[in-house]
Amino acid sequence: MDSDKQAIIAILLAAVLFTAMGMLVKILAPTLPAMEIVFARNLFGLLWILGALLLRPPKQIGGKPFVLALRGFAGGSAMLAYFYNMSIMPLGTAYAFSYTSPIFLALFSALFIHDKVTLKTWIAILLGFSGILLISNPEGTGLTLFGVCIGLYSGIGAALAYLSIAKLAKLYDSRVIILSLMFIGTLLPLLTQIVPYTSYPIPLFQPFVMPNFKEFLLILALGLVSTYAQIYLTKAYTMGNPPIIGAISYNTIFLATLAGIALGDKIPNALVISGMLLIVCGGILAVLHKHQ
């Protein structure tokens, strides 16, 4: 089997695993706080990456610890928002918000590193933001303004993290870059335990709840599934054509929508479905243009 076919199989497996991850979050969310779930997921990944680094130490130039930490914070905080989204909104909508990252990346590349903005880029941005407006419609999803903001941040934070990867990839082992994400993604939920809960003006953070045996097993499954999803995603982009792989990855939104309905989410109305399609079109256009 040639590498392109293997890459397509890998990205489809990653899509199934990411959907399974969302389903596990949905099952755990009614009894465990979202921050606790993301802490467990990142702790599993952190231990996995540390083990890999101990077995095969990294060979790298380094020298940009601040950029590395900033990447970890942007990606880690985006993951917190992403998991919170999955706990409060329909699964397909949460994934649609997350998959706005290529659209924000195109915008930030133009604003911060002065990439040339072509007509295709502006069309991608326009399609993406039109889709965001449609899926943010309270009548379609029941989202509050706060929920929309957290939804948007899951895409914005991921885009900011991706923006730094090109520079970091020349200086650091890819596992060290992932380690920064896992470490800060583990640290941030712990920091939320410091402030008394009566002081929080937003419902994002909740006190720690000790998981029972069944929940503990589901948390272990979540860590395993999400780690292998990341492995297959990386394998797909390593072996295949990035624009094609990026375009195929958007099928995760539709898989997540079906999975959410199976778990009790409302069937999205025509506006929400149209918004998802616009985000998919805008994201694919942004991904294809970025790799031209």
Image (spheres, grey):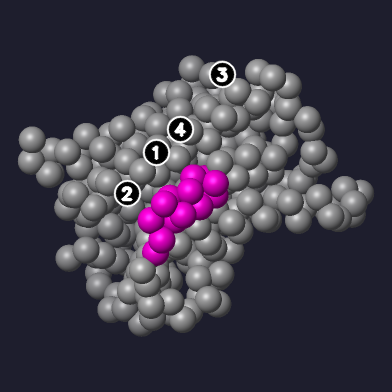
Residue under numbered circle 2: 234
Mark 1 secondary-structure assignment: helix
Kind of residue at disc 4: Val
In the image: residue 83, left or right of residue 128: right
* Mark 4 or mark 3: whose residue is earlier in sequence: 4
How far apart are the two marked residues, 2 and 4, measured between alpha carbons? 14 Å
Classify the position of the N terminus by image quarter.
top left
How far apart are the two marked residues, 4 and 3, measured between alpha carbons? 22 Å
Please report contact status of discs 1 and 4: CB closer than 8 Å, yes or no.
yes
* Mark 2 or mark 3: whose residue is earlier in sequence: 2
Magenta region: 45-58
Mark 1 or 3: in front is 1
Classify the position of the C terminus by image quarter.
bottom left
Residue drawn at x 74%, y 51% as measured from the top left: 190
Q: Nearer the viewer, residue 212 or 285?
A: 212
Q: Nearer the viewer, residue 183 or 259?
A: 183
The dot on residue 229 is: 1
The dot on residue 225 is: 4
x%, y% of residue 15?
35, 35
